[in-house]
Structures are given as structure tokens and as C-alpha cells.
Image: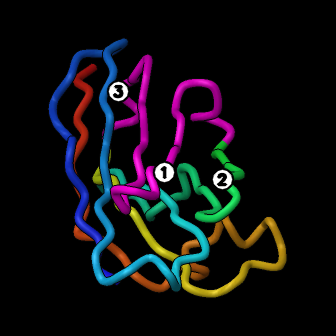
Amino acid sequence: VQLVESGGGLVQAGASLRLSCEISGGTFSVYAMGWFRQAPGKSREFVAAVRWSAGDTYYRDSTRGRFTISREKSKNTVYLQMNSLKPEDTAVYYCAARNNMIYYSSHYYQEGSYDDWGRGTQVTVPS
């Protein structure tokens, strides 16, 4: 599948943003969708994931309660609603697709579990 992220930008601390990830090429093979982020000079890290069919969600501890992942099947789109943004949320945000079943919940959190990646969208929260 092909993934295209949008919705990034520069916002002040405490503001909100909603990122979108449009999936093309069909979602029949998609098992789960994830959001990851990479800050300058740091490795890419897990943010949130959702199982495409059932909708169960998984979050990084530092974003749980502030970020919400959701999917809209009719639009083949995954969203990441980000509230109460902090300077440490500054990063390039990537969405990713997993095409095969995940048997262990820990695998939702692992970058290597995902098969297809978007090119990312920049989120900047100045300090």
C-alpha cells in the first residue's frame, strides 16, 4: 500500500493538530496502522497504533491521554489527534502499515513490524 501523511505544521505549546494518513492501493491486506515519529538526532519511536478491523489501540506512555489514533474505513484514512502539544513532540511523524496478523501485542510497538511507510509530515512546537 501507499501512504501519504498530511496535517503537520508549526503550532504553539498547548495547541492541537490532527494528522491524517491516506492509504491507497487497497486496505484489504492491512492488519494494523501505526504512527511513529523521529526528532532531530534521535531514532524513530513508536507513538500509537490501531488494529484496522477491530479498532483496538496502543499508545506510547508519554502520549497516552493527549494523542488519539483513529481510523475511518470509508475513507481509507488513519488519524492522529494530538492535543496539549509540547516542545518535545517536535518531530517528523510517519504512518506505517502492517500487512499481516500481529500475534503479540508488543509487536504493535516495534518499527520492524510494519511493512509500508509514508514520507512523513513535520510537526514543530517551539519552546
Q: Earlier in the sequence, mark 2 or mark 3?
A: 2
In three-dimensional space, the C-alpha distance between marks 1 and 2, rounded to whole angstroms, equals 8 Å
Image quadrant in which you'd find residue 98? bottom right
- Image marks 1 and 2: residues in contact by CB distance under 8 Å: yes
Mark 1 falls on what kind of element? Answer: strand
Location of residue 2 with respect to 8 vertically, above or below: below
- Check disc 2 and report the residue beneath it: 55
Residue 74 horizontal/vertical position (percent):
40, 57
Identify which residue is drawn at 67% across, 66% down: 108
Q: Is residue 123 above or below residue 65?
A: below
Within-10-Å neighbours for mark 1: few <14, some 14–19, many 20+? some
Distance of mark 2 from mark 3, alpha carbons? 29 Å
Percent coordinates x, y for residue 84 in the rendering? 43, 17
Q: Which residues are magenta?
A: 61-90
Of the two numbered discs 1 and 3 on the same chain, state the one appearing first in sequence. 1
Which numbered disc covers residue 71? 1
